[in-house]
Structures are given as structure tokens and as C-alpha cells.
Image (cartoon, rainbow, N blue to C red):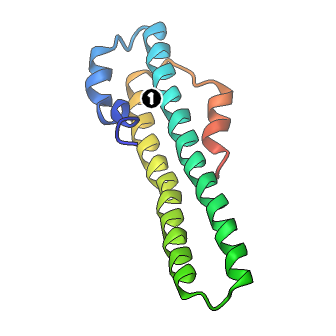
């Protein structure tokens, strides 16, 4: 996630180097920004899917052997890990909000595509 958030971490520098009066330059930067958002969303969703498959297996095993304390501990640890990864969505919302505010302030004439707005609102 750290690598995928570099564009957001350096947004002020990148926006200062971008010709914000040019719609084409803003569109190109927006393309990179939105691509990073999609990649991060997919990464978090993938991790959650993998964890969910593992949790399903562990829950099935626990149903067969409800007294297995080692399995209960492992299940608790995996559920904690899942919550931690799910919290990345909250972090992502904060990062996006900050970056989009900067982008909109610099590229005022650029209109975000409707499908991108839908992408941003799909989890809300």
C-alpha cells in the first residue's frame, strides 16, 4: 500500500509540476491518480477475499471441534487481521479525500468522469 500511495504522498509536488491550466495535463494526472485508487481498492479486496476463505475453513473446522482452543486462538488472530485490513478502506477514504481536494483546487476546470464518482461512492 505504501508503494501504491506514493502518488498521493507527493501530490503537492506533482501538482506544482503539472500545467494545471491545461485540461489535458490535468486529465493525464487524474488518470494516474484514479488508476492508483483502483489498484489499491483491488489489493484490499483481494486480501479480504483470501482471509475470508481462510476464515470459512477455520469456522468449519471449529464447528467440527468446538473445544479446540488453538483453533479458537488462530481464528481470533485471523479475524483481527481481517479488521485491520478492512480498516484500510477508512485510510483510503481519508487519503482520497485529501488528494482529491488538492487536485480539485489546482485543476478547477477539470470535470471528473461520472464512472469515477460512482467508483468513489460504491462503498458508502
Q: In this orientation, which residue lies closer to the viewer: 104 or 34?
A: 34
Q: Residues within 10 Å of mark 1 (few under 14, many from 20)?
A: some
Q: Residue at x 73, y 82 (%)?
A: 63
x and y, in percent, of residue 32 in the image: 46, 22
Q: Please, is residue 24 above or below residue 71 in the view?
A: above
Q: Secondary structure at mark 1?
A: helix
Q: Across the whole image, how many numbered discs are drawn on residues?
A: 1
Relative horizontal placement of residue 2, taking residue 90 as reference (left or right) = left
Q: Is residue 83 above or below residue 65?
A: above
Relative to 9, say whether 62 is above or below: below
Residue 78 vs 65, above or below: the answer is above
Q: Which residue is mark 1?
A: 104
Percent x, y of residue 61: 69, 76
On the image, which quarter does residue 119 sit in?
top right
| Relative image position of residue 94 (x, y in whole percent) | 43, 49
Percent of width and height locating residue 91 = 44, 52
9 to the left or right of 1: left
Amino acid at each position: 500500500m505504501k508503494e501504491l500511495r506514493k502518488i498521493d504522498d507527493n501530490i503537492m509536488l506533482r501538482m506544482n509540476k503539472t500545467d494545471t491550466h491545461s485540461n489535458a495535463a490535468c486529465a493525464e494526472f487524474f488518470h494516474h491518480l484514479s488508476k492508483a485508487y483502483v489498484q489499491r481498492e483491488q489489493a484490499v479486496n483481494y486480501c479480504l477475499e483470501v482471509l475470508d476463505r481462510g476464515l470459512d475453513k477455520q469456522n468449519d473446522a471449529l464447528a467440527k471441534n468446538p473445544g479446540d482452543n488453538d483453533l479458537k486462538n488462530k481464528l481470533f488472530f485471523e479475524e483481527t487481521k481481517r479488521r485491520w485490513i478492512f480498516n484500510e478502506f477508512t485510510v483510503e477514504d481519508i487519503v482520497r479525500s485529501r488528494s482529491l481536494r488538492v487536485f480539485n483546487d489546482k485543476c478547477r476546470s477539470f470535470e471528473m468522469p461520472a464512472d469515477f464518482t460512482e467508483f468513489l461512492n460504491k462503498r458508502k
